[in-house]
Image: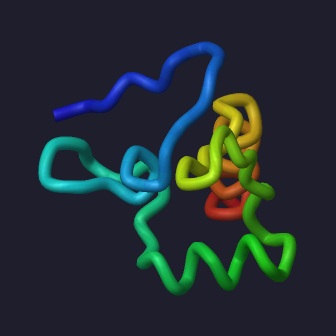
């Protein structure tokens, strides 16, 4: 099953890290993800509402590209 990333918009954490319906885009755990956000390794989230946090698709695409380039070296 391959997940298609939209060209624009926002992704919720479950869409990035995967869940029972979608495979992970970035295969790390929640704690690792939030540590990476705090340290600057992963992009900062956008608060869409008080209880809704998401990430810009463009930022996630750039992260995937950067991680893939690092894996090839």
* Placement of 53 over or under 62, stated as above or below: below
Q: Where is residue 37 in the image (x, y as percent from the top left)?
A: 74, 71
In-front residue for pair 24/12: 12
Q: Would you identify the image quadrant in which residue 19 lies? A: bottom left
Query: What's the residue at 66%, 36% (across, down)?
Result: 61
* Placement of 67 over or under 61, stated as above or below: below
In-front residue for pair 73/65: 65
Q: Where is residue 10 in the image (x, y as percent from the top left)?
A: 60, 31
Is 54 on the left or on the right of 38, as rendered?
A: left
Query: What's the residue at 64%, 43% (across, down)?
Result: 49
Is 4 on the left or on the right of 8, as rendered?
A: left
Q: Position of residue 30 (x, y in %)?
A: 46, 76
Query: What's the residue at 41%, 65% (across, down)?
Result: 27
Quadrant (top left/top right/bottom left/bottom right) for the C terminus: bottom right
How is the structure coloured here? rainbow
Quadrant (top left/top right/bottom left/bottom right) for the N terminus: top left
Query: What's the residue at 45%, 73% (across, down)?
Result: 28
């Amino acid at each position: 099953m391959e997940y298609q990333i939209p060209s624009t918009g926002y992704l919720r954490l479950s869409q990035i890290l995967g869940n029972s319906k979608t495979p992970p885009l970035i295969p790390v755990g929640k704690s690792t993800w939030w540590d990476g956000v705090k340290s600057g390794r992963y992009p900062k989230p956008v608060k869409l509402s008080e209880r809704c946090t998401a990430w810009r698709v463009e930022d996630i695409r750039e992260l995937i590209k950067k991680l893939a380039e690092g894996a090839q070296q």
